[in-house]
Image (cartoon, grey):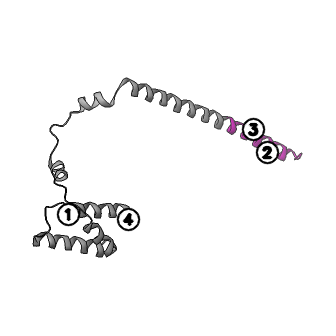
């Protein structure tokens, strides 16, 4: 949780600092509000947060790449051709056979142990009731 919060703080600091300048009063107010929120509500160290904000750089090409949406989205049949291939189907079949074999072996071991333990219990009950044990 702390890692996610730190990651969020770093990303927010990066996004705020990516603006061309922080000279405008609105941006300064937003920056100070965000810093206060990170310190008071999330328990960050003030020096740590200020260090992050001081070391961020403006990257206009990053902002441009973030704001561009995908040209086209693929439909399920197009994705299906990518994800469902003969190789993957063979691998899945192999894994299923391996799992089934393991389950059968485990069941056989369990069944044998149950039968053997039942045999021992019956023998002990018989000998105990017959007075020989």
Q: Vertical placement of 87 versus 56: above or below?
A: above
Single out the mark in the foreground, 1 or 4.
1
Magenta residues span 112-133
Measured as percent of width and height from the top left, residue 21 is found at 13, 65
Q: Residues within 10 Å of mark 3 (few under 14, many from 20)?
A: few
Give the labeled residue for mark 4: 2
Identity of the residue drawn at 16% across and 70% down: 30
Which secondary structure lies at badge 2? Answer: helix
Write down the residue under mark 1. Answer: 17
Foreground label between 2 and 3: 3
- Which residue: 56% across, 30% down? 101
The numbered dot on residue 119 is 3
Circles 1, 4 touching at the beta carbon (< 8 Å): no
Where disc 3 sits, the SS reads: helix
Q: Earlier in the sequence, mark 4 or mark 3?
A: 4
Can residue 1 be seen in this snapshot? no
Estimate the spatial distance between the alpha carbons at disc 1 and disc 2, rounded to whole Å: 81 Å
Along the line of sight, which residue is nearer the eye, 100 or 15? Answer: 15
Q: Residues within 10 Å of mark 2 (few under 14, many from 20)?
A: few
Mark 4: secondary structure: helix
Badge 4 density bin: few <14, some 14–19, many ≥20, Cα 10 Å: few
């Amino acid at each position: 949780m702390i890692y996610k919060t730190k990651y969020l703080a770093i990303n927010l600091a990066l996004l705020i600092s990516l603006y061309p300048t922080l000279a405008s009063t609105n941006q300064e107010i937003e920056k100070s509000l965000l810093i206060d929120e990170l310190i008071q509500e999330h328990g960050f160290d003030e020096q740590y947060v200020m260090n992050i904000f001081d070391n961020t750089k403006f990257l206009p090409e990053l902002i441009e790449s973030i704001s561009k949406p995908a040209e086209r989205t693929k439909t399920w049949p197009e994705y299906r051709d990518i994800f469902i291939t003969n190789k993957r189907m063979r691998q899945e079949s192999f894994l299923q056979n391996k799992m089934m074999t393991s389950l059968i072996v485990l069941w056989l071991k369990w069944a044998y142990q149950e039968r053997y333990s039942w045999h021992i219990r019956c023998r002990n009950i018989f000998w105990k009731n017959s007075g020989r044990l």
